[in-house]
Amino acid sequence: MMISGVSYAQDIPSPKSHFGFHIGDNYQLATYTQTEAYFKKLAQTSRRVKLVDIGKTEEGRSQYMLIVSSPENIQKLDRYKEISQQLAHATISPTQAKALSQEGKAVVWIDGGLHATETVGAHQLIQTAYEFASKTDPETMKILDNVIILFTHANPDGQELVSNWYMREKDTAKRALSGLPVLYEKYAGHDNNRDFFMLNLKETQNIGRQLFIEWIPQIMYNHHQAGPAGTVVAGPPYRDPFNYVFDATLLTSLDAVGAAMHTRLNVEGKPGYTQRGGSVFSTWYNGGLRTTTYFHNMIGLLTEIVGSPTPSEIPLVPARLLPNSDSPNPVTPRKWYFKNSIDYSVSLNYAVLNYAQRHADELLFNIYQMGRNSIDKGKKDTWSFSPKKIEAINAAAKKGGNTTGGDFEFGARSMNVKYFDTVMNAAANRDPRGYILSADQSDFNSAIKFLNALIRTGVVVEKATAAFTVSGKKYPAGSYVVKTDQAFRPHVLDMFEPQDHPNDFKYEGGAPIPPYDAAGWTLAYLMNVKFDRIQDDFNGPFEKNPYGKLLVPENKLNGTNYVLSAAQNDSYTAVNDLLKRNIPVYRSNENGDFYVSSSGKSILEKANVKLIQATEVKNKSKVSAARVALWDNYGGSMASGWMRFIMEQYHYNATVIYPQDIDAGNLKSKYDVIIFVGGAIPSPQNGGFGARAFGPKAEDIPANYRNRLGRITADKSVPQLKKFLADGGNIVTIGSSTNLAYHLNLPVRSAMTEIVNGEEKRLPAEKYYVPGSVLKLGVDTKQPANWGMEKEADVYFDNSPVFKLTGDAIAAGKIKPLMWFDSATPLRSGWAWGQAYLEDGVTAFEASVGKGKLFAFGPEIAFRAQTHGTFKLIFNQLYK
Ligand SMILES: [Zn+2]
């Protein structure tokens, strides 16, 4: 059979024969059920295809990966996987690595469908898989001979939801991707691409296993939408800043593969590719499906392409028409079809795979060399550059009276090199050789969760089989060690060390350039993991945990009465299990520790929590489970979805409620606590959410979702919330939902203001700007709301609300500050321009309203279910 001059093997079913339409036909989307059946057919009919079930999704579907290569290679997959692993781990000699690079095949990952409304993703995957299962042209055959391709579906549940939603309309003119009733990943929606260092979600865990443990591909390609207006597709290489922990070879490899992709489109007469400054994507952030791979020496590719099954337009954007080195081949305004986007995507896949087949031995050796460089750096004293070190060099020179040089200007006199040495040869500034996580820390179970996140991405963790001493400090047996002399050192550093984001401005004195996602996220800080950072070589009775093998806490149940620390997150899970079985639980009135009698034994055995060695808690009160409601809205709020995830993980029964439920009133008869995550409560200044219609019309959606429509309003919802508080209900607000304090006329104001010409104004971004970063706060540990917290807490802060409370209100006891900035330099990780403005600002408070209480937490204390260090601030409010 010949189609436009390309030959296809005859016995492989085409998409048209299976789906009833060509992939890329207008108004046609395939569901996952159909796609899964098609993948099975390809595997049955093509000797080039092996179907692998990589695990269940959150909704219980099978998630599939199609391994595609020549039939000869398919017979030897185990060997090629082993070679890929050995080269990535880089513990073999350069000679062995050279030999394996010759023997091995390049491994390339191509996924689709992660963001389910970006429908090109899943559909290019189907089309590309078909072409590689069936085509017999020389280029395809060479690729099959030299590359193992891993075609992976990134979000099966999402494709099923979105395709059924779009196709439910018989009239093609009515088909639309907008107005989905729920998130296209059960908990996270779009945030499913922000989960790759934490690996909370099943899909992330499945993908992570293949990427970081099983195959460790040298190249991975993650498809997204949409390109910036006036372009077709944005792709590699990406704009600055890049993360300073990367190996330089990674960045130049992104240039090389990017050039191959870009050039292929130009040769094929497909205009409209843009790179670097042509789009907003950078390589700073860790946690994206693409970006986490950089920290593992993989060439991670992202494209963002336009197009949808409903025909669209390339709009006229005059500024995009003039060619430049970011966009040398601009696209002109035109009608745009789904098929155009599929064709572009298949071309881009071919470009990547053709690059891989031509450079297979080099790709294999380079990932080895990057890993080798990491290991070497971890074995000796090294000094990494970061903006703070450059500042320190400049500061040292200034102090020494040497102020010339220091910039790139031609003719500038150079600085005395001794100022380099004062910073970059100082012992205190050396990169760490490793980290020790002592088993005697207050929440060791959470430390183990942190280590498991590292293990899921292939990091080597070691366990002490006996007590040991390092730098004069003793550690008990069972402590863990993470050393930096390993191939994935960049990821290790990134999870323990602060991110030092550069001060990135449009021009000197101008507005800041927002980072693509977070600026700082140091996971060890967000999870309140206690660790020692060791800068000298160290050793001990350490045993390596096998790659990918998850750790299980080993807690023993001693005694007959049990005290569970309020500092341990898993204590709350155990308590919830006990309360569900009506076993009495008491709480210390002094520090919130839980007390359980021997009747809780069997449940505590299963809970696997650490107990405090205490015989009795004297001053205590009985606790019971509060009836908890969690706000959400039509379409699903991601923040609410993550909170729902946390509630399930820690065994809380939270009922999801919608604005209409709140407006209907009578709330206290049903709930004791309502949680409002960020984005729920509008600001009173902007007149609330009323101005703009939200969500689809009721008649356009299925009846069972109509009760979810609407938003929280000042005129209908707030009076019901006031009534709820008056009746003795408690409300927990997070992030922007602390706006509720203003609706309630509490004596609080924003602290992030300045007086200009006698008027109070918001601080402009030129003076104060803190994009997603980790900041340090002071905590009032005496307050029951804060039980289990320490005097200082690291919180995730994203230009979050900060308050001033009036002294009178505090004195009258109506309002209690819970957390505040106790220094002018609270930045722990990320970027905090103008951080001195934060000093003394209150970030959390508790206010008595009627018989109830409002808890307001400005920082994102539940962010993406990553901030385990601040989960207790929620948990404490969920008991009576
Ligand atoms: Zn996307």
Image: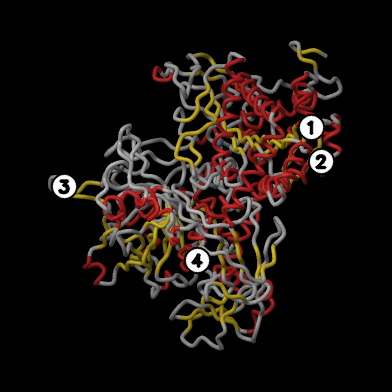
Label 2: which secondary element:
helix
Mark 3 or 2, nearer chain start: 2
**Mark 4, residues whose alpha carbon is within 10 Å: few (<14), some, or many (≥20)?**
many
Q: CA distance from mark 1 to mark 3?
A: 68 Å
Crowding at mark 3 (Cα within 10 Å: few <14, some 14-19, many 20+): few
Tell me residue 44's x, y (percent).
86, 33
Query: What is the crowding at mark 2: few (fewer than 14 residues within 10 Å), some, or many (at least 20)?
Result: some
Q: Alpha-carbon distance for marks 2 and 1?
A: 9 Å
Residue 754 screen position, x and y as percent? 21, 50
Quadrant of the picture in which ligand 1 is shown: top right
Q: Nearer the viewer, residue 435 or 795?
A: 435
- Looking at the rendered image, the quarter that the N terminus falls into is top right
**Residue 69 shows which numbered tag?**
1
Pick the front one: 427 or 283: 427
Ranked by sequence position, the earlier of labels 1 and 3 is 1
Residue at point 36%, 69% (across, down)? 851
**Residue tagged 3:** 759
Quadrant position of residue 339: top right
The dot on residue 723 is none
Q: Amino acid at mark 3?
A: Glu
Residue 643, percent from left and from top: 52, 55
**Left of 360 or right of it: where is 196?**
left
Q: Nearer the viewer, mark 4 or mark 1?
A: 1
> Which mark identifies residue 875?
4
Instruction: Inspect the image, locate mark 2, and give the three-letter code of the amino acid beneath it.
Output: Leu
Q: Secondary structure at mark 1?
A: loop
The residue carrying mark 2 is 77
